[in-house]
Amino acid sequence: MSRNEALSLLHEYTQSDALRAHAYAVEAAMRAYARRLGEDEDLWGIVGLLHDFDYERFPTLGEHPYRGAEILRAARWPEVVVEACLAHAEFTGVARDTPLKRAIFAVDELTGLITAVALVRPSRRLAEVEVRSVRKKMKDKSFAAAVNRDDIVRGAEEMGVPLDEHIGVVLQAMQEIAAQLGL
């Protein structure tokens, strides 16, 4: 199990540049939390890359992320990766009973909101995004309406991290790979 194998699988199933960028953003956030918590950065990063790899081909609630889990199991990916990918979606009912499972849930929606905040900046750059601007846009329910704010708040709570600190961790991780994200 390597990052290159995860990237290969992501690229095989995901053609959309936006969805690939989302995977890279989640990977960066997961790696940041792994460093912060003294966990396995490579494992956490791989979960970030793979959590939505099946979404483009199987976008319905009945398929995603279940089809992805089937594909990962058939390819003999470790069950810890499969379970974490399933745990990122509230509706799967998979318990978020490990730091890895809590982290993937916590960062997923937040990376989307941060990306949306960057995209409305005149420069379209993550370097200009601040925690307070993310918090302000979070209050505007019509902004990035598809982003589940409750999941962001619940994710921070489950991680045991104040919301502003959580936003800061994820924002900084994304800023560090801004060029790769095109932001």
Image (tube, rainbow, N blue to C red):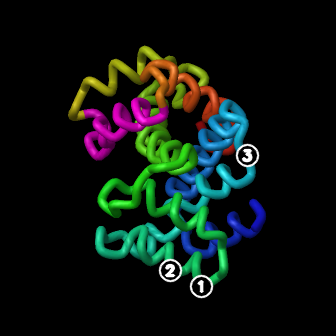
Residue 126 appears in the figure: no
- As measured in the structure, the alpha-carbon distance from the residue carrying label 3 to the one carrying label 1 is 24 Å
| Residue occupying the far front of the picture | 97
Query: Could you say where residue 130 lies in the image, as x and y percent from the top left?
Result: 51, 17
The boundaries of the magenta stretch are 143-159
- As measured in the structure, the alpha-carbon distance from the residue carrying label 3 to the one carrying label 2 is 24 Å
Tell me where residue 182 sits by quadrant.
Answer: top right
State the residue position of label 3.
41
Q: What residue appears at the point 74 percent right and 52 percent down from the top-left corner?
A: 42
Question: Count of labels shown?
Answer: 3
Examine the structure image and report whether residue 97 is included in the region drawn in magenta: no
Query: Callout 2: 10 Å neighbours few (<14), some, many (20+)?
Result: few
Q: Are marks 2 and 1 in contact (CB under 8 Å)?
A: yes
Residue 84 appears in the figure: yes
Indicate the secondary structure of the residue bearing disc 2: helix
State the residue position of label 1.
74
Indicate the secondary structure of the residue bearing disc 1: helix
State the residue position of label 2.
70
Q: Amino acid at mark 2?
A: Glu
